[in-house]
Amino acid sequence: MNASTPGILMRGLFGNAYLLLVLTTLSWGGNTIAGRLAVGEISPMVLTAFRWVGVVALIALFARRQVIQDWPVLRRHLPFLAVLGAFGFTGFNALFYIAAQSTVAINLGIIQGAIPVFVLVGAYLVYRTPVTAVQVVGVLVTMIGVALVASHGDLDQLWSLAIADGDLLMIGACALYAGYTVALRRRPPVSGIAMFSVLAVAALVTSLPLLALEAAAGAMVLPTATGWGVLLFVVVFPSFLSQIFFLRAVDLVGPGRAGLFVNLVPIFAATLGVVILGERFQTFHALALGFVLGGIWLAERGRKT
């Protein structure tokens, strides 16, 4: 391998939108595995707070120029960005990692796959974005899939509210992230990496009170060797590289085509859950995955041009 080979490989990677999107969604699917591996090895709020410590450190190394360049605009929008970081990054990840304490990675991934439909509903409620009849059907189909997962294939549990706490928390996490996504319509005119940097700092700051509450409750678990490995993976892949990859892919193919690849997250999560964690992929998982992905497909196909 000559000296120019790494540069050629990097140019090839950053010039291939579809490879970048596959790596991005693989990282996000891998986050569900990390959440399950973290159980007993690092507590949820330690993982959430330390995650953003690592991300902010990487940003200081690689993205400070973009932040400095866009700072005059960013400064005018700091309160808004702080709220986005608190709900979309801190809130989502805190609930995600708490949910992972009591539900399997397959469930986490399938429920997370419903976020596009949560976004569709949120956009209608907040902005009255037009919704077609086909999109309504898509929402209903996706919700059936989420209900199948939450009830573990026994819909009678829905009527008796006998739903696992972890699944309910994951639904709440998805609602928070959908709210964050809907609010991005009001994002300031700055580069994606600069805005992500400010959101990451906001996430770090707002995660500290949650860490203090966890410590006060005596529930803090500092990382074991496995916990440090989970933390390293979460910082580098789902939190940092995947964001850079996704931003670059959006530049290459646009947000619409890039957004469709998010549908791979539940597929990767289910596959990795079976292969790495040995989780059992049951019939209701397959049905739920089909409903979730089918509903999203209907919602996308029914969108007005």
Image (cartoon, rainbow, N blue to C red):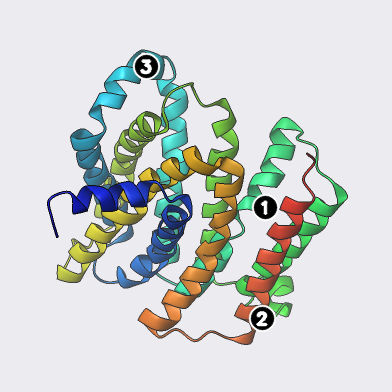
Circles 3 and 2: CB atoms closer than 8 Å: no
Q: Residue 1 carries which label?
A: none
Badge 3 amino acid: Arg
Q: In which quarter of the image is residue 111?
A: bottom right
Visible residue check, residue 271: yes
Q: Quadrant of the N terminus?
A: bottom left
Which residue matches tag 1?
117
Q: Where does residue 164 sit, x and y in percent of width and height?
A: 55, 72
Q: How far apart are marks 2 and 1 (CA)?
A: 21 Å
Q: In which quarter of the image is the C terminus?
A: top right
Image: 299 above or below 248: below
Visible residue check, residue 103: no
Frontmost of labels 3 and 2 is 3
Q: Residues within 10 Å of mark 1 (few under 14, many from 20)?
A: many
Circles 2 and 1: CB atoms closer than 8 Å: no
Which residue matches tag 3?
75
Q: Which mark is residue 153?
A: 2
Q: Residue sitting at 72 percent across and 61 percent down?
A: 295
Image: 110 above or below 128: below
Q: Where does residue 269 sit, x and y in percent of width and height?
A: 47, 70
Q: Where does residue 67 sit, x and y in percent of width and height?
A: 30, 25
Q: Along the horizontal axis of the image, is 266 left or right of 73?
A: right
